[in-house]
Amino acid sequence: MARLTLKGIRKCFGEATILQGVDLDAPDGSLVVLVGPSGCGKSTLLRTVAGLEAPDAGTVTIGDRDVTKLPPKDRDIAMVFQSYALYPHLRVRDNLSFGLKLRGADRALIERRVREVAQMLDLDALLDRYPRQLSGGQRQRVAMGRAIARRPSLFLFDEPLSNLDAALRAEVRVEIKKLHDALGATMLYVTHDQVEAMTLADVLVVLRAGHIEQRGAPLELYESPATRFVAAFIGSPSMNFIEAEIADGRVRAEGLLLDAPSSVRPGSILVGIRPHDLVQTADGTLALRVDVVEAMGFETYAHGELAGAPFVARLEGSERPRRGDRIRLAVERFHLFDPNTGRALGRSSG
């Protein structure tokens, strides 16, 4: 395996700048997840690492080799696509061994690698089937197995779970995590699904409009978002945002009253409150009229409006509010953002 280092990667298509000088380091053996909305540049960055796109500026280094100008076949990488990209006329065993045969590996090595991969991914009973005879989850496991059999320096995943239903996504996501732990491989993984990103990543990288908005451990980005954009993108349901004022040491808005951190100056402020940082209680300082109730088993999501903005609270327990009820909520923790720049100004307990 090998370290991946990107320096100053810039990519334009015509007049549109897709990547704006991206610097990124993926340590040896790490699983780095790129996440962001459609059009942010994450797939373009992955294709640049793979050699499928040439950067207009910057360098791509894998291990101690500058591979910026090398074709994909010479980069010692393996890529897993969302479309599986299996050869329909080949059986599973031949799909698994295809890359090794292209490299001229001897028969004994090919058979050993196919056997190891099939056992690792529970594909033993499927080796003589064709891709058309497999489920979506089985096809994706074969695609991963083909990559593993080659033992590359770097694995690239381009939204590999997006074609699967919810149950299969969860199942294959666990398989990918197990694979990473077992192989100790360096992996760069692209997804638009922030839940997928949070559960898989050692290092989570949030992209926005071609630049890195924030990077770090998933829990770090969840608990200490650097900007409103990161705060809104990471977490499900999304963080609530309320326009407020700080005066006399209090954060004030319609239906909201909180103690302000001493480090934040008086004036206009944007308050961010995660649905999971709210507790229903009779003496709560936040008042919410419930418009929609989502029952999710032990959890309930109560939707309403606060200070003119949509607002959602996560409630625990079997007792659920009804539409039209007014509930009071205590805020356990909140975040403050500059209303003009979106930069984080701090966080505080309620």
Image (cartoon, rainbow, N blue to C red):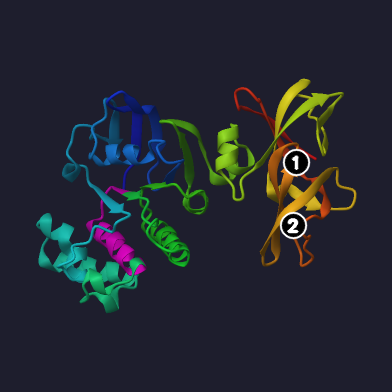
Q: In the image, is residue 176 part of the stretch drawn in magenta?
A: no
Mark 2 lies on residue: 315
Q: In the current view of this chain or complex, which residue is farthest to the bottom?
A: 125
**What residue is rendered at 34% in x and 32% in y?**
6
Label the magenta part by its dominant secondary structure.
helix
Q: Amino acid at mark 1?
A: Leu
**What residue is rendered at 44% in x and 62% in y?**
169
Q: Earlier in the sequence, mark 2 or mark 1?
A: 1
Please say if 42 is above or below 169. above
Q: Is residue 315 visible?
A: yes
Q: Position of residue 121 (x, y in %)?
A: 34, 68
Please say if 246 is above or below 295. above
- Left or right, 78 with reference to 320: left
- Residue nearest the observer in this picture, 46 or 69: 46
Please say if 219 is above or below 308. below
Q: Amino acid at mark 2?
A: Leu
Tell me where the magenta segment starts and ends, as one range: 137-155
The answer for how far apart the CA atoms under marks 2 and 1 are is: 17 Å
- Left or right, 67 with reference to 183: left
Mark 1 lies on residue: 306
Q: How many marks?
A: 2
| Element type where label 2 sits in the image | strand
Which marked residue is nearer to the observer: mark 2 or mark 1? 1
